[in-house]
Amino acid sequence: MNESTISEPMSSGGQLRTIAISKPSIEFGVILGTLHYSEYTIKLIAQLFRSSEQGTKKIEWGAACLEAGLDPKIHLAASSETMKQLIEQNARALRTSHSFIVLFRGLWPMEILPQLRALPTICAIKGASNEAGAVIVLSVSEPMTQDSRTNPPTIHTMIGYQDGAIFETRIEERKLHSGGI
């Protein structure tokens, strides 16, 4: 996972970061966003992808739904062990509360997006693409109790998805300035 900070710390203690999505090639699509009730949502997403595997069309897919919290529990479903490992790697890098990420091959994002958006537990779609890209994450340290004021926990929230030529240019710039990734 490639992570970079894209802003100075905010006065509230928050910071914007980008986390690159790890996927083998442009043949893989990604859809991500926010949700509520992740344990139920993972079942709905799995059912949706399984129903899309009709006829001879082979679809590879993996989905992760993250619960709320400082170290969110991750619910996984996938068409293979390889896809399960890939989606788990991305979900662990994100650590964003109330969010989901789906990686797939054999469909274009627009072929599955309307059905995914229609799920009752999906709150917002933050991105859908086959291009290389990164999730924009807001990390905020919030004292939640009297005891946590000296070392407040950090909460991570998915803000959006940046893809395409802009993202690829920034990756190339980082390689030039850092001597490689």
Image (cartoon, rainbow, N blue to C red):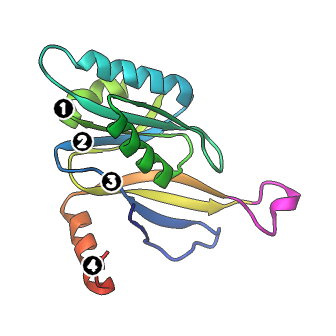
Q: Foreground: 46 or 154?
A: 46
Q: Mark 2 and mark 1: span between their CA atoms?
A: 8 Å
**Residue 139 image point, x, y percent:** 57, 61
Which mark sits nearer the N-terminus, 2 or 1? Answer: 2
Question: Could you tell me which quadrant the N terminus lies in?
Answer: bottom left
Q: Would residue 49 appear left or right of 144 to someone viewing this image?
A: left
Any mark on residue 107, and which?
1
Which mark sits nearer the N-terminus, 3 or 4? Answer: 3
Tell me which segment is drawn in magenta: 143-153
**Residue 56 image point, x, y percent:** 11, 18
Q: Would residue 138 appear left or right of 2 to someone viewing this image?
A: right
Q: Which residue is mark 2?
A: 29
Mark whose residue sits in front, 2 or 3 = 3
**10 Å neighbourhood of mark 1: few (<14), some, or many (≥20)?**
some
Residue beneath the point at 28% across and 50% down: 23
Q: Is residue 150 magenta?
A: yes
Q: Mark 3 and mark 4: span between their CA atoms?
A: 17 Å
**10 Å neighbourhood of mark 2: few (<14), some, or many (≥20)?**
many
Q: Which residue is mark 3?
A: 22
Q: Mark 3 and mark 1: span between their CA atoms?
A: 18 Å
Q: Mark 2 and mark 4: span between their CA atoms?
A: 25 Å
Is there any visible trace of residue 51 in the rendered image? yes
Amino acid on which disc 1 is placed? Leu
Q: Foreground: 127 or 106?
A: 106
Q: Which residue is mark 4?
A: 175
Q: Are marks 2 and 1 in contact (CB under 8 Å)?
A: yes
Q: Compared with residue 152, is residue 60 higher up or lower down, i.e. above or below?
A: above
Residue beneath the point at 36% across and 35% down: 81
Residue beneath the point at 83% across and 55% down: 145
Residue at far left of view: 56
Amino acid on which disc 2 is placed? Gly
- Residue 45 sits in quarter: top left
